[in-house]
Image: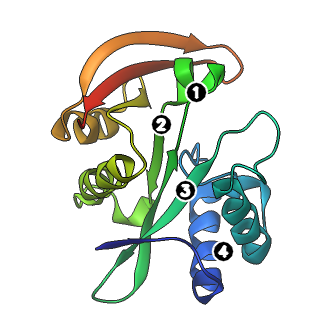
Amino acid sequence: MILLEPTVEYARQIKEFRRELLLCSDTMDGTGALKMYDDPERWIAFVTACKDPNKVRPGLVPATQFICVREEDKKIVGMIQIRHSLNPFLEKYGGHIGYCVSPGERRNGYGTKMLKMALKECRKIGLEMVLVTCIRGNEGSRGVIMSNGGIYESTVFEKNRGLYLERYWIDIS
């Protein structure tokens, strides 16, 4: 399994990944606003711009978007986004990393592997402590975070989505 920044080569699969997530009403965390883009090429342009501090939209922070590709068949099995810093919303609710595994690929260990690889990328951009959050009651996501060294800090209520979010810190220094 490898993490790649999205390219038009994967446009068809990105579109299918989005469709799968929408069909199951997934929150689409870690997909860099994929929910808003039915055109994969426009989404790729958006997430590419988000990486550049000079091009990121007001209110957002620079972020690197990855697709997680299974090497054997080159299939996208997940997406993960690394936020290079935290704004007030991310500091309380969203964290440095958001991730999502394709509904048909869950419970295969991809989330744990994706997060482990993303933590290495976090080190490359100079982060030493990484905040990762998950929806309270999401045992799979909690397990992914804890398998990667997550230490529970607190639970907060995010009123706009009506969700309780568990906050975990991972020391990567």
Q: Where, by quadrant of the figure, is residue 153 drawn?
A: top left
- Tell me which amino acid carries mark 4: Lys
C-alpha distance separating marks 4 and 3: 19 Å
C-alpha distance separating marks 4 and 1: 26 Å
Residues tagged 1 and 2 counted as in contact (Cβ below 8 A): yes
Label 1 or label 2, whichever comes before in sequence order = 1
| Between 72 and 138, the one nearer to me in the picture | 72
When the figure is inspected, residue 123 is found, relative to residue 142, above or below; the finding is below
Horizontal and vertical percent for residue 30? Answer: 53, 49
Q: Could you tell me which secondary element the residue under label 4 belongs to?
A: helix
- Tell me which amino acid carries mark 2: His
Label 4 or label 3, whichever comes before in sequence order = 4
The disc placed on residue 15 is 4
Horizontal and vertical percent for residue 68? Answer: 41, 68
Label 3 or label 2, whichever comes before in sequence order = 3
Label 4 or label 1, whichever comes before in sequence order = 4
Horizontal and vertical percent for residue 4? Answer: 45, 73
Tell me the residue at 17%/40% (across/down): 147
When the figure is inspected, residue 73 is found, relative to residue 18, above or below; the finding is below
Q: Where, by quadrant of the figure, is residue 106 drawn?
A: bottom left
Q: Is residue 104 left or right of residue 93?
A: left
Q: How many marks?
A: 4
C-alpha distance separating marks 3 and 2: 10 Å
> Mark 1 — residue?
90
Residues tagged 4 and 1 counted as in contact (Cβ below 8 A): no
> Mark 2 — residue?
96
- Tell me which amino acid carries mark 1: Leu
Horizontal and vertical percent for residue 132? Answer: 40, 32
Q: Could you tell me which secondary element the residue under label 2 belongs to?
A: loop
Q: Is residue 65 left or right of residue 129?
A: right
